[in-house]
Image (cartoon, rainbow, N blue to C red):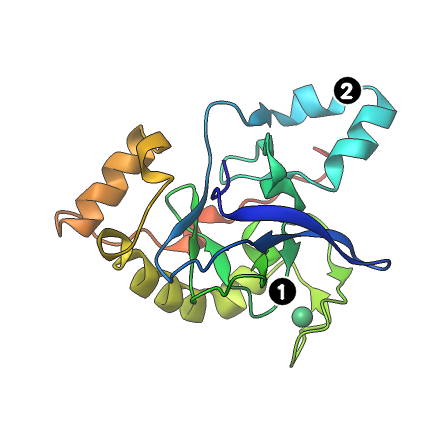
Amino acid sequence: MIHPNTVVRNVSPEIGVGVFATAPIARGTIVVVRDQYDICLTQGQYCGLPGPVRESMETHMYHDRCGNLVLSWDHARYMNHNCHSNTMMTGYNLEIAVRDIAAGEEVTTEYGLLNIQEPYEIHCGCENCRGRLRLDDIEVYGGQWDLAIRESLLRIPAVDQPLLPVFSGPDRERLDAFLQGRAEYVSIKGLAWRACAGEL
Ligand SMILES: [Zn+2]
């Protein structure tokens, strides 16, 4: 589920739609949580879908750390990549704002944390664009991403969190343990998952 202060809008004919903030969202705000209403398919279930359904779904799905394909039930699925994204996936199955997001600003995420299975060209138009998403982005940039994410997670108790009430289960317990100093930070490097040859 995505933060309530967001909406889908057209970005450009080349990019299509994206998600935009309708009010300021502070760094440390949980912007997306995985919830029980998201569609979660195993590789086998996904491969068993009719071709047209698979093709329509695949653009908006991501692989979780177990290799399942996840399709957000709301407009979280329309978040675009940016090489300097203002939100990032974390090791807690939530996406966090890693910068303050202004009203009207596009809410973006880092696709390098969503287990793309093929490298591909990107045209996000950002400054110092990587130009291409690569399979080893998480190894190359993971250290700096972890620093930004860890720092942002520590702000969770200090900012408004409309999504916290719907975030529960083992991930919530791990997050609370980290925030209360009872457990180490869970690195995003644990998110990496690769299909075995021939599995996809
Ligand atoms: Zn870029």
Q: Secondary structure at mark 1?
A: loop
- Give the mark nearest the N terminus, 1 or 2: 2
On screen, 130 above or below 78?
below
Residue 25: x and y, percent? 43, 58
- Mark 2 Cβ and ligand 1 under 8 Å apart: no
Q: Amino acid at mark 2?
A: Leu
**Location of ligand 1 given as a quarter of the image:** bottom right
75 with respect to 125 (left or right): left
Residue 39: x and y, percent? 59, 25
Query: Which residue sits at x=42%, y=41%?
Result: 93
Q: Quadrant of residue 68?
A: top right
Q: Secondary structure at mark 2?
A: loop
Q: Quadrant of residue 124?
A: bottom right
Residue 195 visible in the displayed image = no
- Mark 1 Cβ and ligand 1 under 8 Å apart: yes
Residue 76: x and y, percent? 58, 42
Q: Which mark is residue 49?
A: 2
Front of the two marks 1 and 2:
1
11 with respect to 51 (left or right): left
Q: Amino acid at mark 1?
A: Asn
Q: What residue does disc 1 label?
A: 82
Residue 74 visible in the displayed image = yes
The quarter in which the C terminus is drawn is top right
- Return the residue found at the far bottom: 128
Q: How many marks?
A: 2
Query: Which residue sits at x=32%, y=36%?
Result: 171
On screen, 136 above or below 1?
below
